[in-house]
Image: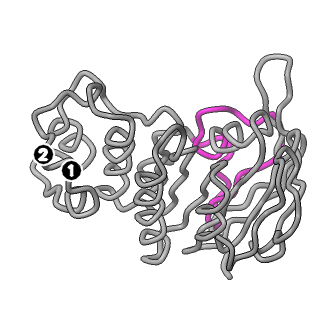
Amino acid sequence: MTVELSVRGLRAGYGAVEVLHGVDLDVPAGALTALLGPNGAGKTTLLSVVAGLLPARSGHVLWGERDVTHVPPDARARAGLALVPERRGIFSDLSVRENLEIFGGYGQPVDAAFEAFPVLADRLGQRAGSLSGGEQQMLAMSRVLLRDPRLLLLDEISLGLAPRVTRRLFDVVGELARSGTTVLLVDQYLSDALRLADVVYVLARGEVAFAGEPAELAGKTLPGYVTPVAAAGDR
């Protein structure tokens, strides 16, 4: 498979604390790559560096054939990178309609959001911050559906949500990957992440502890997890 995103020798952190210690990672084009690991492993830090929100201390971020290590985040976004952060990234004081208009561009159709998440059509006049947690995450995911990004970074989209809502969000992510969007997904919800993933990386203490296909993890206990990974037929 062609590599869309390549991270090489990446070191990054906050203040005097280094979180990533020379990480190497390849994300295939048009596929879904799951980045797993316990809290504090460095997953969100890695996404922040790839999105340009946190500078790399050393190493390189290569997107396509371009070194974007020092490219500003807004330039990466204009080139087709989208990040849905852990805390959802919506405009809480604006209505659902206003959020969708901002995400898609004023005057542009927003039907794709309603097709994926019909409940949003019934909430257009409601303040986004007053939505349930699941509805807020659906609204945040609508940005992706309306922008059609080339590279999508997702950080813990299932955090704190009911299994039914989580399954719908992951189904939408799977549809995006099948349509050709390159996805790098960070999550601790192992069953759905592994159900959708083409490639899996496991981070532990800022280093890559595993890289391979989901089937290779069956029966293994990942660093920071209590139970072994279920086989595909058990999920």
Name the kind of residue labelled 1 in the image: Val
In this picture, residue 49 sits left or right of residue 207: left
* On screen, residue 3 above or below 206: below
Give residue 161's position: percent from left, percent from top: 47, 42
SS for dot 2: helix
Residues rendered magenta in the picture: 49-71
Residue at position x 88%, y 39% in the image: 205
Query: Residue 145's quadrant in the figure?
Result: bottom left
Please tell me the numbered disc located at residue 111.
none
Q: Position of residue 186 (x, y in %)?
A: 63, 50
Residue annotated with mark 1? 119
Q: Residue at x 57, y 44 (%)?
A: 156
- Left or right of 225 on screen, residue 83: left
Image quadrant holding the N terminus, namely bottom right
Residue found 84% across the figure and 48% down from its top: 226
Q: Which residue is mark 2?
A: 122
Residue 148: percent from left, percent from top: 36, 62
Toward the viewer: 180 or 78?
Answer: 180
Quarter of the image that includes the C terminus: bottom right
In magenta segment, residue 12: no
Helix, strand or loop at mark 1? helix
Question: Badge 2: how crowded within 10 Å, few (<14), some, or many (20+)?
Answer: few
